[in-house]
Image: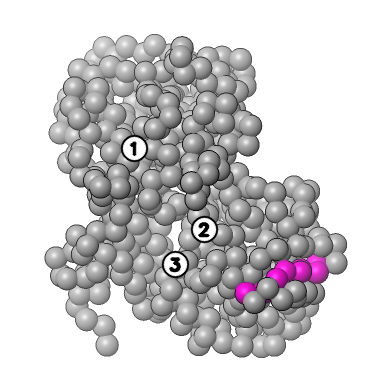
Amino acid sequence: MKTHATPSRRKLLQLAAAALSVGIIPMMGRASDDSDNDYETGDDDLSSNNTTLALANTGLKANIVVIGGGMAGVTAAKYLRLWGGVDINVTLVEPSAMYTSNIMSNLVLNGSRTINSLAYGYTSVAAKYGVVVKQAWVQSIDTAAKSVTLSNGSTLPYDRLIVAPGIEFMNAFGLTQSDYESKTPHAWRAGPQTELLRQQLAAIPLDGTFVMTIPKAPYRCPPGPYERACLVADFLKTHKGAASKVVVLDENASIQAEVHSFTEAFTHIHNGVIDYRPGVTNIQIDPDTKAVSFKDAQGLPVTILANVVNPIPPQRAAGSDGGWLAQTGLNNSVSNGVPDGRWCVVDVLSYESTAVKDVHVIGDAASCGLPKAGHVANQEAKICADAIIRTLGGQQPDSAPVANSACYSPITATTASWLTAVYQYDAVNKKMALAANGGVTTGATATEAGAIDTENFRDMNTWFNTLMSDSYA
């Protein structure tokens, strides 16, 4: 029987996308009639800084460029205008016309959702908040001149630059990019590969074998691979026979998120279908024969012949492999005392890079102590926007920022679990860390998990719609 405390905490999840969204900057007021805009509107612009929303005349002026139109970038662009007012000119640089949400994309695999249902555009943030959207690639960043050069040859001057490029995938398993796109899709960026994996899953033979891999943490969306294993298992035993198998090859020593929920799912709900193998190494995949070889946790060689292979590669900040991000020197992370260049270390009070002044990195590319997830990216964006607006106003960034990480994970086609965690600034280690009690007055711990049931599955859609609206509407 559920206690009365659980539904109230569930409401926190539904409202969590709005956390930090109001009341941080008390500058909202009457819109100015004479906004200056230093950026010319070109053919590739979605809008100028004109708005359908009355923005405040805060007296603050700055040109801010945001690179990347995912959850982090678009949220930062929106809230910079909302909190900063009419003279904070914001330009969002994004090569794609639409963003496809990675959140909920696992539900495409079992037909519960379509890829198109996860597509979000930039019309609202452009028209409503006056964010200028440039559909172009970043060619280079000149941090001395404070300018960004785009693929169309134009340059954007900035006072502050926010970088939210997301992730790119590292070479692994002996596979090529062509293999991922046509034979063994990772589908860890929602889009064509997600649809390909759905088709392969639908075509798997009766009592077939699905093999997937999980890279060593950190990777984007810690619960995502385990969620995928559950949904695939549910689909296979429902449509392809109870003797179907989902073999999960985890390069980590144990489940990385929602341990209680996924242990329950693996050992009871999907018992006999999911074969979970942690601590594997040296994974190699033949994209044509679908043979997967590896060493198990004891170091013994194993080979499995699969019908479908879903290898999720290790990840790093996009542009860190000799691209513009690396050329700017932003990828300065260290692993075990050795520079690895995978992520961008930031000051989590403002998300300003520890390597480059006046450049902020948010979202999956940042190394800050928070998990790499869409809800977290939304939170980081708001903390960053808040800090920039405070700094432009001659204040210091908030010295004790708080962020919420919330997530629902579908376990079957009709049930889901949930998890929420509250993070606070750790002044000793200068990182975000789990709060002692999660900031919840009911005595809950910093990390909470909910039961696997149909009510959570329904609430999952409310949470998702709230989150996406907060970022893109």
- The stretch drawn in magenta includes residue 427: no
Label 2 – label 1 distance at C-alpha = 21 Å
SS type, badge 3? loop
Residue at the spot 26% in from the left edge and 64% down from the top edge: 446
Contact between marks 2 and 3 (CB within 8 A): the answer is: no
Q: Amino acid at mark 3?
A: Ala
Residue at the spot 70% in from the left edge and 49% down from the top edge: 171
Residue at the spot 42% in from the left edge and 54% down from the top edge: 371
In the depicted structure, whether residue 370 falls above or below residue 287? above
Q: Nearer the viewer, residue 104 or 290?
A: 290
2 or 1: tag closer to the N-terminus: 2
2 or 3: tag closer to the N-terminus: 2
In the depicted structure, whether residue 403 falls above or below residue 49? below
Part of the protein shown in magenta: 290-297
Residue at the spot 24% in from the left edge and 69% down from the top edge: 445
Which numbered dot is residue 232? none
SS type, badge 1? strand
Label 1 – label 3 distance at C-alpha = 25 Å
Q: Which residue is mark 2?
A: 217
